[in-house]
Amino acid sequence: MKQSMKLLAALALLLMITPSFAQVTVNPKVGLNVSALDAKLQDLDAEVRAGWNAGFDLRVGDGIFFLNPGVHYYSYTARLLKENEIDNPEDIKLKDETTIQSVRLPLNIGFRLTGDNGLLGIHAKGGITPSYVIGVNEKANFDFDVKDLNRFNYGANLGVGIDLAFLTVDVTYEIGLKDYFQNAEGRNNMLTASVGIKF
């Protein structure tokens, strides 16, 4: 846990000091994300599905390559399902939905496929994304909270972005590199689409 927090602190420090060394574009954005992760947690089935996100990226450098770090808040919807322990041939299943909140710090290298100063700009990017779960909306009748998750996680991501004047559209696919749950196999692969502005 200490090593995880040190890494997050180092990445946050990098975001603060980078603007003093190069030309910087700020890119606040909001978006939607979709996961397809199912896991069996003792008597509980958990399914991570759609969510939303908000944050900002930086584009550092004005050449063909640029550094592309960011800070983002993510909220995922998780479906919970379990069977009641009753003496009945047809067990009653309890269903509910909760949300999982996390902070994500992508650190990417970008590649400009077209110029950056015209009406239309296209770029590709790739890198790593450390993340940290900050909370779970706990539900009655379901024993599911942050202790069931690997709070510090990371993944590798690839994406493409389009700039139309000051507007931006980004699509990113992240491949989870660590199990999402503490006691169950399954990595969270996620598709994110975001829109924003740049200045």
Image: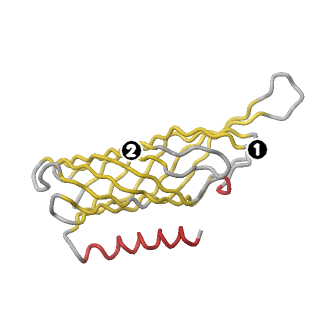
Reading the image, the residue beneath label 1 is 141
Mark 1 surroundings: few (<14), some (14-19) or many (≥20) residues within 10 A:
few
Indicate the position of residue 60 as horizontal and vertical percent values: 24, 66
- Total tally of numbered discs in the picture: 2
Q: Earlier in the sequence, mark 1 or mark 2?
A: 1
- Name which residue type carries label 2: Tyr
Image quadrant where one finds the C terminus: bottom left
Q: Is residue 17 left or right of residue 121?
A: right
Reading the image, the residue beneath label 2 is 173
Image quadrant where one finds the N terminus: bottom right
**What residue is rendered at 54% in x and 52% in y?**
178
Q: Which residue is at the front of the view, 103 or 184?
A: 184
Compared to residue 66, the image places residue 89 above or below, namely above
Indicate the position of residue 76 as horizontal and vertical percent values: 52, 47
Colour theme: secondary structure
- Between circles 1 and 2, the one closer to the viewer is 2
